[in-house]
């Protein structure tokens, strides 16, 4: 439930931020997912209407007014050179897993998002305390940055802390990888706590049901008396 609530709040905050971003800025949002097999980064690049022409000129390398798939790939590689990922203070190379570009009209209107899916192979299955660092320096003269870790989809990884610099160029995430025994203990602890809460609440629920039944009977009797 807490994971669902966190995801909904993050999505709502992202929607508000994207909707309200300044027209003369280049909003760049990074969402980072930790998995036992590595790291996934979803990078959204949204140029405001007043800077869209400058961004499009960088993508349209030959200046013919048409953005080709090759030019999209070239620009994606340029962005990739401006971002960096470290795990436990060691540089981890990022690779392009997917590239999606909006239309020229959407970018000119300030509503088009360039989406880059990045992946990195990293051994995040080793039990213990770990640290991830992500930094984005792409077009810093125009850029406004956001970076957030996503809630892990596995109970093996627990995020324990986050730090950002003032402009959110960089994000540091502290996390813990639980061993199989620790995960089993955590699950059993949750089951025991749930059982304890249920045992404490059940008598109260029975009293409430009994009270409601007496109240209903009194109401029925009162109606019969007045009728």
Image (cartoon, rainbow, N blue to C red):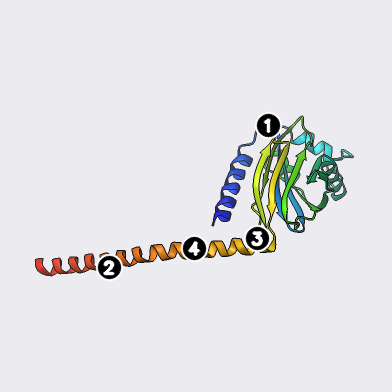
**Element marked by disc 2:** helix
Residue under the image location 79 percent in, 55 percent down:
123
Report, in whole angstroms, how far the alpha carbon at label 4 lies from the one at label 1: 41 Å
Q: Are marks 4 and 1 in contact (CB under 8 Å)?
A: no
The quadrant holding residue 180 is: bottom right
What residue does disc 3 label?
Answer: 182
Q: Position of residue 112 (x, y in %)?
A: 70, 44
Of callouts 2 and 3, which one flags the residue occurring earlier in the amino acid sequence?
Answer: 3
Dot 4 or dot 2, earlier in sequence: 4
Say which residue label 1 marks. Answer: 166
- Towards the viewer: 100 or 78: 78
Viewer-side residue, 162 vs 222:
162
The disc label shown at residue 210, or none: 2
Query: Mark 3 or mark 1, which has the lower sequence index?
Result: 1
Residue at point 40%, 62% (across, down): 200
Q: Earlier in the sequence, mark 4 or mark 3?
A: 3
Badge nearest the viewer, 4 or 1: 4
Q: What is the x, y in percent for residue 7?
A: 59, 52
Residue 194: mark: 4
On-image quarter of the N terminus: bottom right
In the rendered structure, the answer to whether residue 141 lies left or right of residue 209 reads: right
The residues bearing labels 2 and 1 have C-alpha atoms spaced at a distance of 58 Å
Q: Residue 219 appears at what percent x and percent y?
A: 18, 65
Element marked by disc 3: helix
């Amino acid at each position: 439930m807490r994971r669902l609530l966190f995801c909904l709040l993050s999505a709502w905050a992202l929607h508000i931020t994207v909707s309200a971003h300044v027209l003369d800025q280049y909003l760049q949002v990074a969402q980072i997912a930790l998995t036992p097999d590595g790291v996934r980064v979803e990078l959204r690049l949204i140029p405001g209407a007043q800077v869209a022409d400058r961004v499009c000129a960088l993508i349209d390398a030959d200046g013919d007014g048409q953005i080709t798939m090759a030019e999209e790939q070239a620009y994606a590689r340029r962005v990739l050179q401006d971002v960096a990922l470290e795990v436990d203070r060691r540089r981890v190379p990022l690779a392009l897993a997917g590239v999606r570009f909006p239309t020229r009209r959407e970018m000119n209107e300030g509503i088009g998002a360039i989406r880059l899916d990045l992946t990195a192979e990293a051994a995040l299955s080793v039990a213990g305390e770990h640290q991830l660092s992500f930094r984005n320096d792409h077009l810093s003269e125009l850029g406004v940055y956001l970076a957030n870790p996503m809630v892990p989809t596995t109970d093996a990884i627990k995020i324990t802390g986050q730090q950002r610099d003032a402009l959110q160029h960089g994000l540091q995430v502290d996390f813990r990888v639980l061993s199989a025994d620790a995960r089993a203990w955590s699950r059993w602890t949750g089951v025991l706590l749930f059982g304890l809460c249920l045992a404490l609440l059940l008598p109260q629920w029975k009293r409430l049901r009994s009270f409601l039944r007496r109240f209903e009977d009194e109401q029925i009797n009162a109606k019969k008396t007045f009728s």
